[in-house]
Amino acid sequence: MSAPPSVGVVIPTRGDRPELLREAVAAVLAQDYPGRLAVVVVDDGGRGRPGAELGVPALANRRTPGLPGARNTGIAALDTDLVAFCDDDDLWLPGKLAAQARALAVTGGEFASCAIEVEHAGRRVARLAGADTVTAADLLRSRMVMVHSSTFLFRRGALWADESAPGGQNEDWDLALRAARRRPITHVDRPLVRVRWGGSSYYAARWADRIAGLDWMLDRHPELAADRRGAARVYGQLAFAYAALGRRRAAVRWAVRAFGARPGEPRAPIALAVAAGIVPAATVLGLLHGRGHGI
């Protein structure tokens, strides 16, 4: 019987939330996995100290500053069969790694994800895909929040994060799309990662970066505009981001495009309400996050 594949886990951090990092590392190390498990923490702040006191290697990001460069720094430092990601504010739940490794062995796939449990303001909501595979068409139609970077497990050398992503925005969606084009993603539809949404997130409300990241995705994946439902979603997100920045004309322009692609797109009227000052963007996000959804 062959040995289970070795797994290397990359945990990027900025070094300013040591307690969350400690919990993330502990949850990874607590996995009941029969193969070799290696963990590396990569500090995007360049200091390379966080994680050293936790008994795992700690590196500084020596590539492009930002999340993709930090992830690639970790990948390059590993010699394992498989690579996994875990954000420093998320938690792997018991059985996550073993379940995904088994699923990859059964399907012969090279990339796996799993369902998640979103935690916000003391409430937890499971987000399931309702399927055991995820295709590129699925990811064009919907961002599929459960195909989250902290769920990724893939064959080392097959894929790298794209360091050209502005502000690190949407690099995980881009990576999943590229993976799904090679071969459908193997998905374990059980919530095996707890994704914690809240004020601790470094990417919580960087609206200009979100806009740049969505523009980058539209340029990099022109097929997004060909799927009317997927296009309406992205246009609606752009409308909301511009509204959150107070740029009303741009918000209206993108809302009109969203309606044109799909008249029933719900983000368009929400963006218009934010642009008109009827409701603050933060209030909308708080209500959505409480239900395990993003904009």
Image (spheres, rainbow, N blue to C red):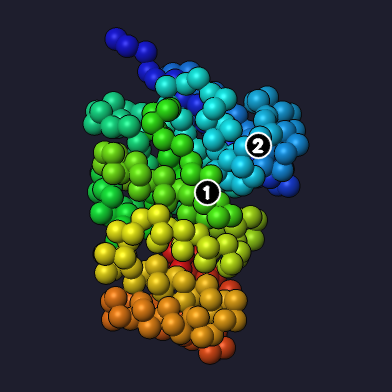
Residue 23 visible in the picture:
no
The x and y percentages for residue 111 are 35, 36
Q: Secondary structure at mark 1?
A: loop
Residue type indicated by callout 2: Asn
Query: The N terminus appears in which quarter of the rendering?
Result: top left
* Residue ID at (44%, 82%): 253
Q: Which residue is mark 1?
A: 164
Residue 145: horizontal and vertical position, in percent? 41, 55
Q: Quadrant of residue 159?
A: top left
Q: CA distance from mark 2 to mark 1?
A: 15 Å
Residue depicted at 75% across the width and 33% down the height: 49
Q: Residues within 10 Å of mark 2 (few under 14, many from 20)?
A: many
- Name which quarter of the figure residue 157 lies in: top left
- Few, some or many residues within 10 Å of mark 1 (<14, 14–19, 20+): some
* Residue sitting at x 29%, y 59%: 223
SS class, disc 2: loop
Q: From the viewer's perspective, is residue 29 above or below residue 291?
A: above
Q: Residue at x 35, y 48 (%)?
A: 177
Task: Residue under label 2, please give it.
Answer: 61
- Answer yes or no: is residue 211 visible: yes
> Disc 1 residue type?
Ser
Of residues 115 and 215, the one nearer the viewer is 215
